[in-house]
Amino acid sequence: MFPTQAKSSCLLPDTEIDWKAYMAQVEGVINGTYDYTQLQGDTGPLVYPAGFVYIFMGLYYATGRGTDIRMAQHIFAVLYLATLLLVFLIYHQTCKVPPFVFFFMCCASYRVHSIFVLRLFNDPVAMVLLFLSINLLLAQRWGWGCCCFSLAISVKMNVLLFAPGLLFLLLTQFGFRGALPKLGICAGLQVALGLPFLLENPIGYLSRSFDLGRQFLFRWTVNWRFLPEALFLHRAFHLALLAAHLTLLLLFALCRWHSTGESILSLLRDPSKRKIVSTLFTSNFIGICFSRSLHYQFYVWYFHTLPYLLWATPARWLTHLLRLLVLGLIELSWNTYPSTSCSSAALHVCHAVILLQLWLGPQPFPKSTQHSKKAH
């Protein structure tokens, strides 16, 4: 799955996994096929929403019908720099993270570099839109933020892991009635983007692009390698993960995503004290912890959020050295191919440490994360 190739004079040759499949899938749309059940690539059927189709259709034309891999790599290199810029803007506005931590995000992860520039996956495209959305939310541009958030979901569904946090923020910022127009923006954009496919075969489009029950292969899992394959594939295991995911989200919403002494009802009446980034990053991280399976390209779903989660509100027992050790072990786990029982177990231990410190750490409310009640 991850073959090694020799260096070129500029960029490393791509290690093709899904790019040809992406190009074949969007080429089908270009040729007039709008039935999602008929759109196929080398790796299987098209399983991403309509935003993916439009964006990669643009890449199809920009790269000579997908044949100019060097151009695609340069485009993704620019995308990588844009992602770093958006992440740095978020960190600058929200918390004090030691400067040496940014070396980890910029230079220390071969896996992240390869996901962007060598593999040309769609995950980075979804994440750059997500980080743009968070910047807009921090600027109090809630309408535009919700629009970009929905656009990110239209590229890949993993962005839905941030959705519980966004819903909580909308309710605390605007109340139930005020949140409805913002939710309408999210839903309306999905309908508009998917309209050509919905008119052709609505059931086919929804079942393929928003398939929440899709089964993953055990051989590619990064996080559950230590389990027997039969247990990994068992429906009861999936339901247990879902129950744990929802339970922990509820506990954080009730106990951690507001200051001590505030009730949910008081937040709905006076939603002035919210930590946008903490809520969104934690929501996503909880989803990562209880994912049915993590594949190697999924690392970018939360890689850039890890320094915030570890340094923004640290528990007293979590020293700089321990935090760096956690980052290092996570990186090592994601760079172990194929995954082993030890690498998967180490990844879960690191996730548990982060979750524990998120639960036990202080609840600061820095001025930069305070909201005004004004709706944009």
Image: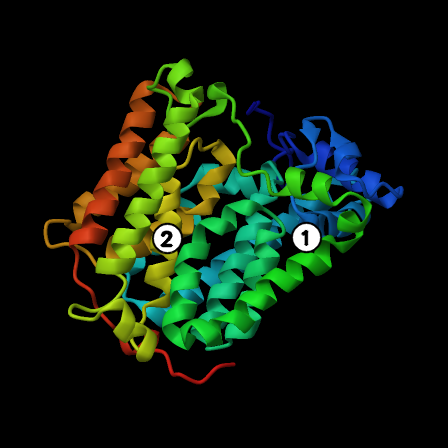
| Colour style of the rendered protein structure | rainbow
Q: Residues within 10 Å of mark 1 (few under 14, many from 20)?
A: many
Image quarter where the N terminus lies is top right
Mark drawn on residue 118: none
Q: How crowded is mark 2: few (under 14 residues within 10 Å), some or many (20 or more)?
A: many
Q: Is residue 186 above or below residue 23?
A: below
At 59% from the left edge and 54% from the top edge, which residue is drawn? 79
Which residue occupies the foreground of this view, 63 or 218?
A: 218
Which secondary structure, mark 1? helix
Q: What residue type is labelled 1?
A: Gly
At 51% from the left edge and 37% from the top edge, which residue is drawn? 297
Dot 2 or dot 1, earlier in sequence: 1
Which residue occupies the foreground of this view, 69 or 300?
A: 300
Q: Which amino acid does label 2 sit on?
A: Ser
In percent of width and height, residue 281 lies at 37, 55
Relative horizontal placement of residue 333, taking residue 66 as reference (left or right)? left
Q: Specify whether residue 290 is in view.
A: no
List the residue tagged with mark 1. 51
